[in-house]
Image: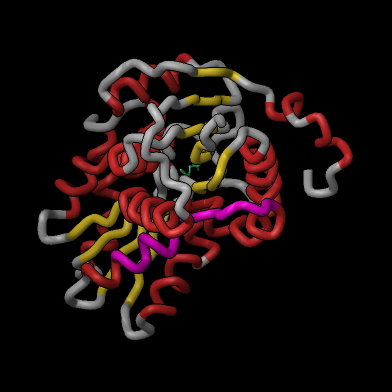
Amino acid sequence: MVEKSIGVFDSGIGGLTVYKSIRASLPKESIIYLGDTARIPYGTRSPATVRRYAYQDAAFLSRQNIKMLVIACNTISSIAMELLKESFPIPILGVIEPGAREAVKTSKNGRIGVIATEATVESGAYTKAIHAINPNVSVYAKACPLFVALAEEGWHNHTATRLIASEYLASLQEMEIDTLVLGCTHYPLLKNVIQSVIGNHVSLIDSGECVAKEVTTLLNKSEEVNLENKATDIFYVTDSGKRFCRIAELFLGKPLENLIAVDIWEANAEAKADPNW
Ligand code: DGL
């Protein structure tokens, strides 16, 4: 029997931060990753467009023999989670709730910053999730759209990144936060710069790491965890994979095997008859 894989997707390279955490926690699970590199960024687009793209990505992955779908993108998690849960009959995990829970657990002074894409900030998803756990916590959200391009460019420790981070994070420093949620899966790639600009007294929350723990718990509960399997990963991208490969190798510390460029429209034969497409 061919073992089922875990599906993981993002608009681009950022979801690899989630992939890396899942890979480390579950060495025997195979992962199928999709990065919609042809249409990145999602975070500056309207909710309707994000929902449409997310639906198409999930439809593609749901046909790849997966047992679970991890939305390794905060923008999609905050806008399209409900649509995906209604549309695909497999367990679906997003990054917002795990990140919010960890942030509330970590903060001592009840002042939490959230940095994310414009779409995630506008959705108010983190503020809602944090307030659902503890309504007395103050949440300060700030959109940092340029961080996505800097992460995709591989400028993870660049002077330009430091300058832009100082500009973006100044208002959060004034709010005396003690915890900062990296509310976009691209941002952990810039973790060193973000930490040095915001200061070591602020704890950074990487929602990717948090969701990896939930994936493990869910798999154990469902008894679908692979004990024997030798993991084989596949990486799909929707545009040429050259840049994706370069940055992925840098981040993962080894060359990517099994990288496939795919046209998700062509790959979904029934797509044209699907009203959500
Ligand atoms: N990685 C995505 C997120 O977590 C956003 C990147 C984009 O704007 O497409 O929100």
User: In the rendered image, which quarter contains the C terminus?
Assistant: top right
Q: Position of residue 158 (x, y in %)?
A: 24, 30
Q: Answer with the quarter of the image where residue 57 lies.
A: top right
Question: Is 94 covered by the magenta stretch?
Answer: yes
Q: Where is residue 87 in the image (x, y as percent from the top left)?
A: 71, 54
Up-down relation of residue 217 to residue 124 (above or below): above
Q: Residue at 44% x, 33% y: name it.
A: 30
Q: Residue at 81% x, 29% y: name it.
A: 269
Q: Position of residue 49 (x, y in %)?
A: 68, 47
Q: Residue at 22% x, 71% y: name it.
A: 107
Q: Can residue 147 be seen in this view?
A: no
Q: Return the residue nearer the eye: 10 or 26.
A: 26
What is the basis of the colouring in this image? secondary structure
Q: Return the residue nearer the eye: 42 or 220.
A: 220
Horizontally, residue 230 falls left or right of residue 265, namely: left
Horizontally, residue 155 falls left or right of residue 159, namely: right
Q: Return the residue nearer the eye: 32 or 156.
A: 32
Q: Where is residue 150 in the image (x, y as percent from the top left)?
A: 37, 33
Q: Give the range drawn in magenta.
A: 88-102
Up-down relation of residue 260 to residue 220 (above or below): above
User: In the rendered image, which quarter contains the N terminus?
Assistant: top right
